[in-house]
Image: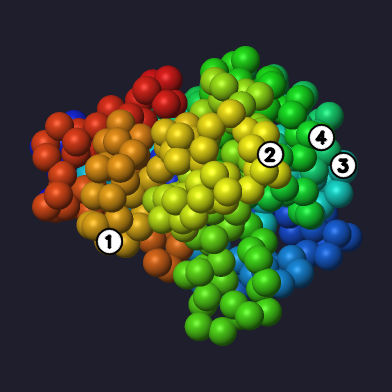
Amino acid sequence: MSDRHQHGNPIDVHAHWYPRAWLELLSKHGLAHGLEWKEIEGKGPQFKVGNLATGPAGPRFVDLDARIAAMDEQGVAVHALSLSQPMVYWAGRETGNRLALSYNDELARAHEAHPQRLIGLATLPMHTPDLAALEVERAAKLPGVRGFYMATRVLEQELSDAALFPVYERIEALGLPIFLHPVFVIDHKRLEKHYLTNLLGNPFESAIAAAHLIFGGVLDRFPKLVIVLPHAGGAFPWLVGRLNRGWEKRADLKHIEHGPTEYLRRFYYDTIGYSDAVVDFLVRHIGADRVMMGSDYCFPIAYERPVEIVTANRYLNAEQQDAILEGNARRVLGL
């Protein structure tokens, strides 16, 4: 039974989508840039770039009618659609830019088809910052685009690389948020077994990105920039005390304005921590106003009942639940 009417209009800020037109473009032009592609009968395409394998991207990833039906069953009112792995950075300047523009155009079409249910987080060709800056301006004008989606690093560039600053400057001026997501993770050879690239690699990628944004001065330079960390912040909230200790004791880390713990509230976090206690930790130590509902739709370990993850959390009161389910996302996304 749907929880939607009992709990307002819950917004899922972490919901991935592969448009059919984008997948077709990927299949046509990806091979020249090292993408491996195969169609699995009845399950859709599966693709691989380097050590990163994605899919098969079956109907739930692609078909919007199937998605809306799943949202209704889950009691979710709105999906903020985003591209997941492999992003577009691996595809070179022209193809990467073409893939980004195509994806964002498809976001607009999805919103126009379901204006009350689907909004978009636009993809940028961050590996070519000049083109990314242009796409910020273009995509922000598209119907339904309410933010931007980036990887926790851009190929070998950390998010503190000064080459990316013109992109941040434009996004900050527009007042739109940046949602982060891991793509290629650290030391993948040690993590190949036991699904550890996801289970451990993803949360540590988020922690590394957060640390670079803090120590690299990005949050000081762009004080109004809104950044959302996936997977309940990954390892970052749990290790921020260690980062802070480094700042206290090491002269080479004193260049930032505050200790890392003071930057906890510069980020927003989703609920994908797979533990009531993780969300409780975020609420108690950072604030219920910094947490938003997410599902990771529809990867293998995604939440099937993201609303119930919030409403059944014994640590959260009704006001906190409402903020996490809907209120915070409305504010961040400007809905």
Q: What residue does disc 1 label? A: 275
Q: Residue at x 78, y 64 (%)?
A: 35
Q: What residue does disc 3 label? A: 94
- Residue type, numbered disc 1: Ser
Residues under numbered marks 1 and 3 in contact, where contact means CB atoms less than 8 Å apart = no
Q: Separation of disc 4 and disc 1 at Cα?
A: 37 Å
Q: Separation of disc 1 and disc 2 at Cα?
A: 31 Å
Q: Separation of disc 4 and disc 3 at Cα?
A: 18 Å
Which residue extends farthest bottom? Answer: 193
Residue 209 visible at all? no
SS class, disc 2: loop
Pair 4/3: label in front: 4
Q: Position of residue 158 (x, y in %)?
A: 72, 47
Number of on-image labels:
4
Q: Residue at x 15, y 44 (%)?
A: 316
Q: Could you say which disc has been placed on residue 163 in the image?
A: 4
SS class, disc 4: helix
